Amino acid sequence: MRDKTPAEPIVVPAIINGKKVKTEKQYPRENPTNPKEIVGYAPVNTREDAVKAIDAASEAFSTWKWTPVEERIERMRRAIEKLKAATPELSRLLSLEHGKPLYDSEGEIAVSLMWMEFAANNVKEVIQEKVKEHEKGKTIITYDPVGVVSAIIPWNYPISLSTIKIAPALLSGNTMVLKPSPFAPLAVSKVVEIISSEFPPGVLNMVHGEEDVGVELTSNPKVAKIAFTGGTRTAKHIMKAAAETIKKMTLELGGNDAAIILDGFDVNDERAMRRLVISNFLTAGQICMIAKRVYVHRSIYDDFVKKYMEAANKWIRVGDPFNPDVTIGPVNNLNQLKYVKSLIDDARSRGAEVIPLGRVLDPDLFEQGYYLQPTLVLGCDYHDPIVVEEQFGPTVPILPYDDEEQVIKLHNESIYGLTSSVWGQEEHAVRVAHRIEAGTTMINTAAIQGLDVRFPFGGVKQSGVGREYGVEGILSYTETHVINIPKDLDLPYIPE
């Protein structure tokens, strides 16, 4: 067992105009494995603090936007090296405050660094000025920074969902004010502190706080763009707040991602079955792109369920995040735990069969923390809440379907469309994928296992607006500026 107990709770500051700012009022972050233990404290900033941070970002933007891209890249690369060196400390802190196993925290930081390096390696080419000579003259196309960006971050993957915004924004010449979630504010604050130390004051700011801070970040006229990851309901309020000044937005929202198992899928493929189990339960199911409902062709349904349970019972080991044998930790917070339990209880009351999966390695710890043993839910109706709502926890319904048209309809009638996956023979799976309404469809894998930071990621319908990652994720922090230089300034069809 690895050492996990902090000597004393840490206290993270806000960062405004390059200075660490502490507040008299603070909020605690508990350890979800042992809610009586306080891991650390974050400041409760005021709306006035948010205004100061936005003003600092606005002032810094006036010079940062003209900073050569080579200097921006060099500063980001120094930050990347510092984050690499700090990975053991950061991953330990993330597991303490979040509840995810240590391997999962280390993986989150690895993905974050992978993206930051991609952005640093590619931003110069992506945003470089393009000059086009043509028969009508010459056109210059530039990719200018947008301005001040407000970034609002959720608790489930706080580091990766911060760096996915910080890296392209700062590299393309923007400044930023970032607000972490109170359910995982500590490790990400350390990350922001490390990155901001490599940039001029005001370029990267961070404030914590309650709803009033979020309102300021989404309505202040000096904010040019909002980058938000979180729930669809909150996004609707953000869009209303941003409407007054027509802010640009990138919104990566909820999903009810489906896995479609075709009749050609080999239920005896143990590696594929393990990938599917992981796609349902990694991070205790608390990932926007996790596979949250599974549709299996009726011809293989019984065999599939049997083999799925075998794979799940082998991989799922619930317990202490610092136990190297553990694959799943607790749910992050009490409200989420209650919500997931309510969906499971509702399914049971409707006649569904709820089957516990895996092993609980430490029953005493399990009772102490926000733990929920993963469950498989069978016998649901296609429109039960546990099927059509985003559970965001360690439970998954598996349902049979009869034909391709039926399952495509079941998939596409959802109000969401973030990711999806199709499992079976490749040619057949790709044919089905073309008919799926989703931002990303993966073949024979799902969730984090199928993520590639080189390509765009985002949702359709109520799962979001815009794209992150890839070249598109860099360009989303720029304004395309066209400068036309016509050869013939007189138009023949306009009379003199």
Image: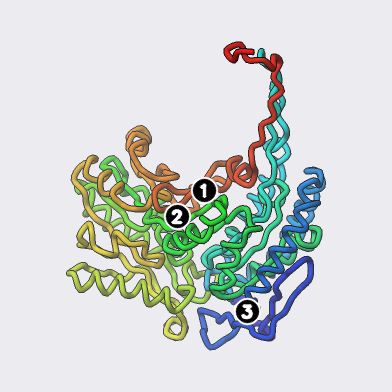
Query: Is 128 above or below relative to 204?
Result: above
Label 1 vs label 3, nearer the camera: 3
In which quadrant of the rendered image does the N terminus lie? bottom right
Residue type at mark 3: give it. Answer: Val
| Residue 322 makes an appearance in the image | no
Say which residue appears at 76% left-offset and 57% top-offset: 79
**Residue located 64% across and 56% down the image:** 149
Q: Which label number is shown at residue 42?
A: none
Tag 1 secondary structure: loop
Query: Image quadrant of residue 438?
Result: top left
Of callouts 3 and 2, which one flags the residue occurring earlier in the amino acid sequence? 3
* Mark 3 neighbour density, 10 Å: few (under 14) some (14–19) many (20 or more): many
Between discs 1 and 3, the one toward the N terminus: 3
Instruction: Check disc 3 and report the residue beneath it.
Output: 44
The residue where tag 1 is placed is 451
- Image coordinates for residue 192, horizontal then vertical, percent: 70, 64
Q: Nearer the viewer, residue 242 or 69?
A: 242
Residue under the point 33% across and 68% down: 375
Q: Specify the amino acid type for callout 2.
A: Met
Q: Quadrant of residue 25 in the image? A: bottom right
In this rendered view, identify the residue nearer to me: 288 or 302: 288
Compute the Cα span from label 1 to label 3.
Answer: 35 Å
Q: Mark 1 touching mark 2, by CB under 8 A?
A: yes
What's the CA distance linking mark 1 and mark 2? Answer: 9 Å
Under mark 1, the amino acid is Leu
Res. 200 in view = yes
- Whole-percent x, y for residue 451 in the image: 51, 48
Q: Which residue is mark 2?
A: 289
Of label 1 and label 2, which has the lower sequence position? 2
Mark 2 crowdedness (10 Å alpha carbons): few <14, some 14-19, many ≥20:
many
The image shows residue 43, relative to residue 467, as above or below, that is: below
Element type at mark 2: loop
